[in-house]
Image (cartoon, rainbow, N blue to C red):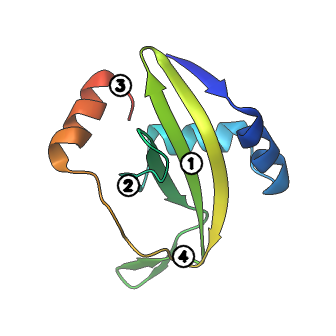
Amino acid sequence: MKIYWTKHAEKKIKFYQLSKQRLKRILTKPYRIEEGVAPQTVALMQPAKIKKIGKKKTWNQEIWLMIQKENDLIKIISAWRYPGISPQSNPIPEEILLELKKEGLI
């Protein structure tokens, strides 16, 4: 599967001091998946660093990735850091998650 990086995504990578390898890791093993803001997009999240307090996991920063799938191409639209823990909104339904896994997107 080929990955296409938009100019906007490359600017954000530089601005937030992220690496393409780190974003590929989010693409393969996301911690949370939600519907993207733009039409036909998916937003993937992974905490920047997880701290364990007892059995509870917590973090103080998240890295987000917005992607769009077109045939055999994954288009990386944007990437950003979110300070703190973002509220969960618009989780993707289970049947769509299974479809994305079958297609090899996640």
For label 2, the residue is: 34
Q: Which residue is drawn at 56% across and 48% down?
A: 65
Q: Which amino acid does label 4 sit on?
A: Trp
Question: Which amino acid is tagged 1?
Answer: Leu
For numbered disc 1, what is the local secondary structure?
A: strand
User: In the image, residue 55 lies at what x, y percent?
Assistant: 34, 80
Q: How far apart are marks 4 and 3 (CA)?
A: 28 Å
- Which labelled disc corresponds to residue 59? 4
Q: In which quarter of the image is residue 20?
A: top right
Q: Which residue has dot 1 on it? A: 65
**If you read the primary sequence from the N terminus, does the residue marked by circle 3 or circle 2 appear first?**
2
Q: How far apart are marks 4 and 1 (CA)?
A: 17 Å
Q: What residue type is labelled 3?
A: Gly
The disc, 4 or 3, on the residue closer to the chain's N-terminal end is: 4
Amino acid type at mark 2: Glu
Circle 1 or circle 3, nearest the eye:
1
* Nearest to viewer (mark 2 / mark 4): 2
Q: Gap in Å between the C-alphas at discs 1 and 2?
A: 10 Å
